[in-house]
Image (cartoon, grey):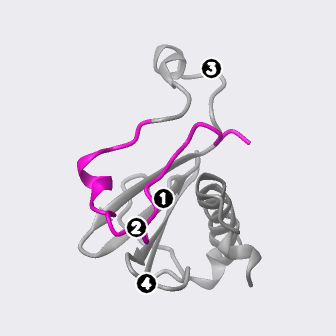
């Protein structure tokens, strides 16, 4: 799994605000892609951002960005809000495609990959596997 060096703050931690003050930067360098944009690189990027009582978890691919905003103290894995953007049709993220029936397959695939990455980093069972 490429996430062996990747770490995130656990959102149920009493110190979840530490994520804001002490960022964790682990993973593989993408300097080669900056020098040579056609060089082979990671297929996805994962990020996390706390905002107003929510933790945003994002997966980005070459074609899409999917974000789930989950309440910090939630007891389940359900997202309060979702964002899905397609870069081929909306390169500046103006139209949120989340929960639209015609984008269900893409959204579900990205959700499962995001759940797996979070589970890999935290040692938890992926939320998608609990359903």
Residue 119 or residue 101, whichever sits in front: 119
Residue drawn at 70 percent across, 69 percent down: 125
The magenta stretch spans residue 16 = yes
Q: CA distance from mark 3 to mark 2?
A: 38 Å
Residue 76, given in percent of the width and then of the height, sits at 54, 84
Which of pointers 3 and 2 lies earlier in the amino acid sequence?
A: 2
Between label 3 and label 2, give the one nearer the viewer: 2
Between label 1 and label 3, give the one nearer the viewer: 1
| Cβ atoms under marks 1 and 3 closer than 8 Å | no
One can see residue 115 in this view: yes
Drawn side of residue 30 relative to residue 102, left or right: left
Q: CA distance from mark 3 to mark 4?
A: 37 Å
Q: Main secondary structure of the magenta part?
A: loop
User: Which region shows up in magenta?
Assistant: 1-25
Q: CA distance from mark 1 to mark 2?
A: 19 Å
Which of pointers 4 and 1 lies earlier in the amino acid sequence?
A: 1
> Label 1: few (<14), some or many (≥20) within 10 Å?
many
Residue drawn at 55 percent across, 42 percent down: 6
Residue 94, given in percent of the width and then of the height, sits at 35, 65
Disc 1, SS = strand
Report which residue position mark 3 lands on: 39
Residue 102 or residue 115, whichever sits in front: 115
Q: CA distance from mark 2 to mark 4?
A: 19 Å
Report which residue position mark 1 lands on: 58
Report which residue position mark 4 lands on: 80
Residue 62 or residue 73, whichever sits in front: 73
Disc marking residue 13: 2
Residue 129, given in percent of the width and then of the height, sits at 76, 75
Residue 33, given in percent of the width and then of the height, sits at 53, 22
Disc marking residue 94: none
**Quarter of the image where one finds residue 69:** bottom left
Disc 3, SS = loop
């Amino acid at each position: 799994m490429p996430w062996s060096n990747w770490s995130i703050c656990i959102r149920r931690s009493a110190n979840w605000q530490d994520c804001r003050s002490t960022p964790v930067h682990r993973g593989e360098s993408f300097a080669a892609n900056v020098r040579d944009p056609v060089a082979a690189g990671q297929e996805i990027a994962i990020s996390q951002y706390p905002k107003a009582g929510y933790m945003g978890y994002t997966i980005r691919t070459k074609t899409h960005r999917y974000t789930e905003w989950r309440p910090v103290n939630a007891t389940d894995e359900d997202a309060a809000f979702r964002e899905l953007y397609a870069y081929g049709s909306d390169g500046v993220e103006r139209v949120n495609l989340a929960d639209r029936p015609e984008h269900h397959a893409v959204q579900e695939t990205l959700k499962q990959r995001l759940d797996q990455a979070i589970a890999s980093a935290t040692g938890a069972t992926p939320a998608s596997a609990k359903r």
